Amino acid sequence: MGEVKSALRSHVGRVRSVNEDYGWVGQLQGGLSAAIVADGMGGHLAGEIASGLAVESLVQSLREWREDLSAKESEDRMRDMIRKANEVVFNTASLNKRYRNMGTTVVVALLNEKEGLIGHIGDSRAYRIRDGQLSLITDDHTLVNELAKMGQLTPEEAQHHPRRNVLTRALGTERDVAIDIRRIDWMPGDQLLLCSDGLSGMVDDDALLSTMTDPSLDLEQKAERLVELALAAGGEDNVTVALVGYDPEEASGGSGGNASRGENGRAGGVPNGGAEGMSA
Ligand code: CA
């Protein structure tokens, strides 16, 4: 079995003065890995509060996650977890005038050694990279994506549309919200990329893929490079990148995951760079 690593970067960008994104990556009990990206919105500091509260609530729920759940139970649990985060943000907004109408996108990935659950609201994205291909797992909850799906905009027009930021769904803006849950398979060699639209709106798929498949970069360097690409493209928005990599088994002759852990001098189970981190 391969080893799971994660990396996280968040940057305010070159135009905004406040970073309203929030990201988290970490290891949970039972050998689970998780990653979250949230992109807050609202006046003044409200967006920052919304994404922070959502991530904090999700991390708390993830820490209580038990692995011995059926597929149906784990999907329900993921939905409940996001619903709870929605409630926290919505209630805070209702109680405080300054935070009225604040909200956030959220994409959360929970992975064991063979599959993953992706929960999502808004236009932050999850991609899986496998066999040199980039697959978008999430469906943007944006007005332009709705129009594109109805054939009223081409995907190209949607990508550059001036109102591409308008969301059809967000976490925390309503008492109840529809949540997308997807189950993916996950195997050694795969990588997962979660990001805010400060990356996906600025950097095209080819550049995402060539960075993620560059054999000269480790996972931390890939996260760094992706942020640099967004900044080089203008850095018009906050940019957050959370990566999870499932290292393939060592080539024949090696002694598997233990060897690479040994080289890094790390205790078993703690991934390289996965000292859990939060950044806004
Ligand atoms: Ca954004």
Image (cartoon, rainbow, N blue to C red):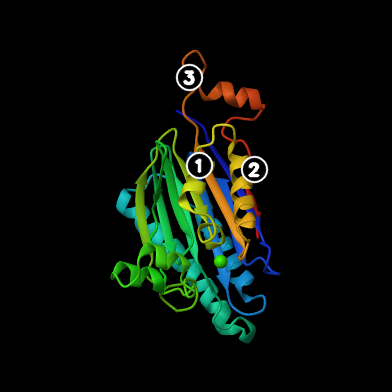
Q: Give me the disc on residue 210.
A: 1
Q: Residue furthest right?
A: 17
The answer to whether marks 3 and 2 mark residues whose Cβ atoms lie closer than 8 Å is: no
- Which residue is more in the foreground, 144 or 256? 144
Q: Earlier in the sequence, mark 1 or mark 2?
A: 1
Q: Give me the disc on residue 251.
A: 3
**Given the image, on which type of amino acid does mark 2 rest?**
Ala
* Secondary structure at numbered mark 2: loop
Relative to 262, residue 24 above or below:
below
**Given the image, on which type of amino acid does mark 1 rest?**
Ser
Looking at the rendering, the quadrant in which ligand 1 lies is bottom right
Q: Which residue is mark 2?
A: 275
Relative to 134, residue 77 above or below:
below
Q: Quadrant of the N terminus?
A: top left
Circle 1 or circle 2, nearest the eye: 1
Q: Residue at x 29, y 69 (%)?
A: 151
The answer to whether marks 1 and 2 mark residues whose Cβ atoms lie closer than 8 Å is: no
